[in-house]
Amino acid sequence: MNKSTQRFSFTTSDGVKLSYLCAGTGPTLLILHGWSQGAALFKHQLAGLCDRYRVIALDMRGHGQSEKPLYGYRIARLAKDLQELITALDPAPLYLLGHSAGASVIWNYLEMFGDTRVSKLIFIDEPAALLAQPYWSEQERLQAGAILTAEQLFQFTGQLRSSQGEQATRDILMSMVTPAMTQDQREELVGVNLQFPRALAARLFIDNVTRDWRDFIPRIEKPSLIAFGRASPHPVECQEWIHQQIKSSRLEIIEAEDGGSHFLFLEAPQRFNRLLSDFLAS
């Protein structure tokens, strides 16, 4: 971790101590990791952007070094946690970045609390609706980004809760990276994920996958950057759809051979940091 990065904590209104990493000074870039991830995975952003921004990466409840209570594993509660952190920090200006399910948390935050505190938004590879409805056309499924059926959802979460939990975690993560990711990077990725107890991870996975944000996304008005890696398991159509719905948005696609995976901020950190800096400076 970058020498200038420090770890802090705050306590939510329902008594959970959450941990976050912070580096730099200036406008605040607040980062939310994806399902089962952690703040530590944004080490390249903490180190690479701290000369221009105060970069904060939160470990959401249950994840990373945050406390792991047996309650609150819903996107709505994570959005409330975010609101409480923003209130405590009172940053201005504020840029919010959400990776994967972290984007879902931001959408929930915006829906419940509005966008008055936020200047710009960054969304990395989160579909509007992950669960395929049986009556949808193929076009609807692609535009929603629905890559799971109900049967697949409960099969996976059943595995997470069982003795297969670690292997199921490895399998899903390895489907989201490029062949160029090193073995050390893969082990780091898995290790951070396993800091979130698997049974709790299963509960949050179900809550996130069963949400449908297609009615809310067109209401987003703040300037938004949508970042997508071509090697993602999600269809590119779902990111193009989000871009079409948010009028003041930019869509940036990183090709697989350049590190463009679901974890593009890890596999193509310099390229991603440049995109991010250009967007925030514009």
Image (tube, grey):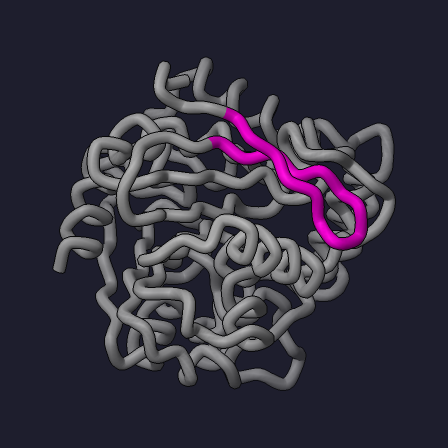
Magenta segment: 7-21
Q: Does the image show residue 269? A: no
Front one among 21 and 157:
21
Q: Main secondary structure of the magenta part?
A: strand
User: Residue 235, percent across and down?
Assistant: 41, 61
Disc count in the image? Answer: 0
- Considering only vertical position in the picture, is 121 above or below 205? below
Q: Is residue 125 magenta?
A: no
Quadrant, the N terminus:
top left
Residues 58 and 12: in front is: 12
Q: Is residue 8 magenta?
A: yes
**Left or right: 7 in relation to 125:** right
Instruction: Judge whether residue 262 can be spotted in this image.
Output: yes
Residue in the image at 47% along x and 59% along y: 126
Q: Is residue 137 left or right of residue 149?
A: left
**Residue 4 lies in quadrant:** top left
Picture coordinates of residue 219 (x, y %)?
A: 42, 84
Q: Can you say which quadrant of the picture contains the C terminus? A: bottom left
Q: Is residue 77 above or below residue 221?
A: above
Q: Determine which quarter of the picture holds residue 5.
A: top left
Residue at 55 percent of width and 77 percent of height: 111
**Percent of width and height locating residue 59:** 59, 38
Is 65 left or right of 158, judged from the image as shown?
left
Q: Can you say whether 227 is above or below 169 in the image?
A: below
Give the residue displayed 71% in from the left and 60% down from the top.
77
Between residues 158 and 212, which one lies in front from this camera angle? 212
Residue 52 screen position, x and y as percent = 21, 39
Q: Residue at x 80, y 52 (%)?
A: 14
